[in-house]
Amino acid sequence: MARGYFVTGTDTGVGKTAVSCALLRAFAAQEKRVIGMKPVVAGSENGTWPDVEQLIAASNISAAREYINPYAFDPPISPHIAAQQAGIKIDLAVIQHAYQALSNQADIVIVEGAGGFLVPVNQTQNGADLARALNLPVILVVGMRLGCLNHALLTAQAIRIAGLSLAGWVANGIDPQMRALEENIATLEQGLDCPLLGVLPFDVEMDAQKSARLLDVVTL
């Protein structure tokens, strides 16, 4: 049975996909069979979903797309609204089945959530319910910018209230002008009470392979 991790973020647009791809590359460097999963994606570009394509490119085994990405919607809006507009209800049982199929093929499955941890996925369930349904330890991506301390600490609290383990966090540089970056990272190291897996600097030329070298997955 594969090991799996659920990657969530302090908000949308904080680099969950970039970190998920870096994690896949880092585990692949340990000669693990790795595959990425995006259970729900909303927001297509020219008929494709970039997050999904990046996860596929960073994986070193292949699987049916219906397992890698069970639900895909065109508009870049909250998944539950996109699904409602499409006349579809996102079913966590479908996602559980897809995850099981992937875990039968891989050593490591990296599951990237949609938006923040509590984003609704249907009218009664949210990202926390999805992570709990898969029963996976969580890796938190903190987009380093003004306001991230509150967002990170609240998200960590929500993860633990959901009864899940916070396996580690990644400081992702998304604001090149952020002040007191090192002090903010130090504050989060103390407040999050889980391993800091790596600090990814703001770099427009950074790719998954380079980022992977900055992550410490040995502690996972």
Image: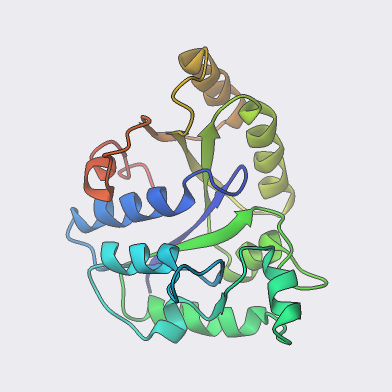
Left or right relative to 220: residue 187: right
| Left-right relation of 200 to 113 | left
Q: Which residue is at a point 49% across and 28% down the rendered structure image?
A: 175
Q: Which residue occupies 45% across, 76% down?
A: 47
Quarter location, residue 201: top left
The x, y position of residue 89, in whole percent, is: 72, 83
Q: Position of residue 143 (x, y in %)?
A: 53, 36
Q: Nearer the viewer, residue 23 or 162?
A: 23
Q: Quadrant of residue 24?
A: bottom left
Q: Is residue 22 above or below residue 66?
A: above
* Quadrant in the picture for the N terminus: bottom left
Residue plotted at (57% across, 31% down):
193
Which one is in front, 162 or 42?
42
Total of numbered circles in the picture?
0
Q: Residue at x 69, y 54 (%)?
A: 163
Q: How is the image coloured?
A: rainbow
Direction front: furthest residue: 46
- Residue 64 in picture, x, y percent from top left: 37, 86
In the image: residue 88, left or right of residue 14: right
Between 130 and 114, the residue placed more toward the observer is 114
Considering every residue shown, the one lying at the far right of the view is: 124
**Above or below 134: residue 164:** above
Q: Position of residue 206 (x, y in %)?
A: 28, 40
From this view, report whether residue 42 is shown above or below residue 173: below
